């Protein structure tokens, strides 16, 4: 259905979508979160970046062979069939609309720096968050062209200032600050813990594979865009961390609630904090838009295949899945409202961790599908096939390690969340018994 509409997303818009998902509110706290791991934090970015590149290479391999919309869902279905494909679509869909609410909360928090009354009024905060969600839902309903252009503009508007801050900071660091870096005990265990934390910052690179039906020459554009996005973000995160460690003493960095603002303040004075707050607003708004984009296009792909309720696959005259966007917006709004109910904040934070797990599991399945495809690939030389096999195995192993590093409780509840989709799948198949032969 999407093929009937003009494809408007090229390399840069696809790149902007992936960067928009990866670079969100987390980057503004990463230096503090990583400070207790000292030099291991710096190595963890390189290790995690390498693991993410391996996963991205496997998704790029699949993008050249499966050019349908859906990304991780489509790749899992192509490799393992309808039921695993549905489960990955189900889990990923839930993770996205939860993430919409989570990043919106971060946006409202930064907005309160400029409108202080928001920090004192839960009702006004909720109203501001709902306004952001539904403005962006409307933007995405209106056209892919408009939403993808907005995504590229905001991705550049947050990426370039952060990169400038990192590079400018690197030439103004105080070398004595590096001597204060914490030296944690544990060796490899500390490195593993730091790497597991770093992985959360890369979740979202796979979103560039989802709107394949809207991307020009997807077999060529998607691999180039997602690999470029992962490489760019790896450089950004590493540079930001090195700069922050060099601009602030370790004891100050470890307790900072706004490390990038403090680092910017050390460079240019009080105005630095204001600049960082503005960039943070852009970053979180961009992240909300990227998640809303995915919350409409991913279930649309599954619905077109007969594996999600049919309404999600219906396109409006302008070529957008309006029903899918509205349902995603409603669920995200409910999740956002729950955050303002006393006693549910801890539960909501736990759902955010589940959101990460349920996004990473479909990536792991997609990487496994890439390995399966590579084993069967007779169109490439044996050397190329062995290379694809090795990359896929490395990517899958890293995904498993990152999932395990999230903790037993998260994996347990994430598994139960996937099982909740089983009766939904049974209902869909009962309504559409030919779903298993749809292409």
Image (cartoon, helix red, strand yellow):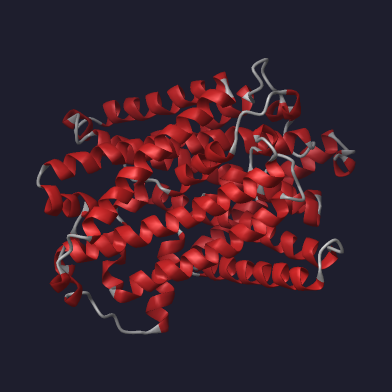
What percent of the width, then of the height, locates residue 278? 26, 36
Residue 406 appears anywhere in the view: no
Tell me residue 175's x, y (percent): 16, 71
In this image, 303 relative to 291: left or right?
A: right
For image coordinates 60% across by 36% down, the residue present is 10
User: Considering depth in this image, is 427 or 375 the residue closer to the camera?
Assistant: 375
Q: Position of residue 109 (x, y in %)?
A: 27, 39
At horizontal 47% and vertical 35% (from top left) the residue drawn is 152
Near-viewer residue (244 or 298):
244
Quadrant assignment for the N terminus: top right
Q: Is residue 399 left or right of residue 152?
A: right
Quarter of the C terminus within the rendering:
top right
Identity of the residue furthest to the left in this view: 269
Residue 111 picture quarter: top left
When the figure is inspected, residue 175 is found, relative to residue 92, above or below; the finding is below
Would you place residue 108 above or below residue 203 in this image? above
Q: Is residue 391 visible?
A: yes
In the rendered structure, the answer to whether residue 412 lies left or right of residue 174 reads right
Q: Is residue 177 left or right of residue 434?
A: left
Give the residue drawn at x 21%, y 60%: 171
The number of discs equals 0
Residue 202 percent across, percent down from the top left: 47, 56
Q: Which residue: 14% across, 52% down?
A: 267
């Amino acid at each position: 259905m999407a093929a009937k509409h003009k494809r408007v997303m090229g390399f840069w818009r696809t790149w902007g979508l992936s960067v928009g998902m990866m670079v969100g509110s987390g980057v503004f706290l990463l230096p503090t979160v990583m400070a207790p791991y000292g030099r291991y934090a710096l190595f963890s970015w390189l290790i995690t970046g390498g693991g993410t590149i391996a996963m991205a290479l496997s998704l790029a391999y699949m993008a050249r062979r499966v050019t349908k919309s859906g990304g991780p869902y489509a790749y899992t279905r192509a490799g393992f069939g309808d039921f695993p494909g549905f489960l990955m679509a189900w889990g990923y869909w839930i993770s996205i609309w939860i993430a919409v609410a989570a990043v919106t909360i971060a946006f409202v928090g930064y907005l309160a720096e400029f409108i202080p009354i928001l920090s004192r009024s839960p009702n006004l905060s909720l109203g501001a968050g709902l306004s952001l969600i539904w403005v962006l839902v409307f933007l995405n309903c209106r056209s892919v062209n408009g939403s993808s252009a907005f995504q590229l503009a905001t991705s550049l508007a947050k990426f370039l200032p952060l990169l400038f801050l990192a590079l400018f900071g690197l030439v103004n660091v105080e070398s004595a600050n590096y001597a204060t870096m914490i030296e944690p005990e544990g060796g490899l265990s500390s490195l593993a813990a730091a790497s597991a934390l770093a992985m959360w910052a890369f979740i979202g690179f796979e979103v560039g594979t989802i709107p394949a039906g809207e991307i020009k020459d997807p077999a060529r554009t998607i691999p180039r865009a997602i690999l470029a996005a992962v490489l760019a973000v790896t450089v950004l995160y590493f540079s930001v961390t090195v700069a922050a460690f060099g601009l602030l003493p370790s004891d100050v960095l470890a307790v900072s609630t706004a490390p990038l603002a403090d680092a910017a303040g050390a460079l240019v004075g009080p105005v630095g904090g204001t600049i960082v707050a503005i960039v943070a607003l852009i970053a979180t708004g961009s992240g909300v838009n990227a998640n809303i984009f995915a919350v409409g296009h991913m279930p649309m792909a599954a619905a077109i295949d007969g594996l999600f309720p049919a309404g999600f696959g219906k396109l409006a005259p302008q070529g957008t899945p309006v029903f899918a966007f509205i349902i995603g917006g409603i669920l995200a709004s409910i999740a956002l409202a729950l955050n303002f109910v006393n006693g549910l904040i801890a539960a909501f934070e736990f759902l955010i961790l589940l959101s990460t797990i349920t996004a990473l599991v479909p990536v792991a399945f997609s990487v496994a599908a890439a390995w399966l495809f590579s084993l069967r690939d007779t169109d490439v030389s044996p050397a190329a096939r062995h290379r694809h096999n090795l990359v896929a195995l490395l990517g899958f192993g890293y995904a498993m390690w990152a999932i395990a590093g999230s903790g037993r409780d998260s994996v347990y509840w994430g598994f139960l969340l996937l099982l909740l989709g089983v009766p939904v799948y049974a209902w869909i198949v009962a309504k559409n018994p030919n779903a298993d032969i749809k292409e």
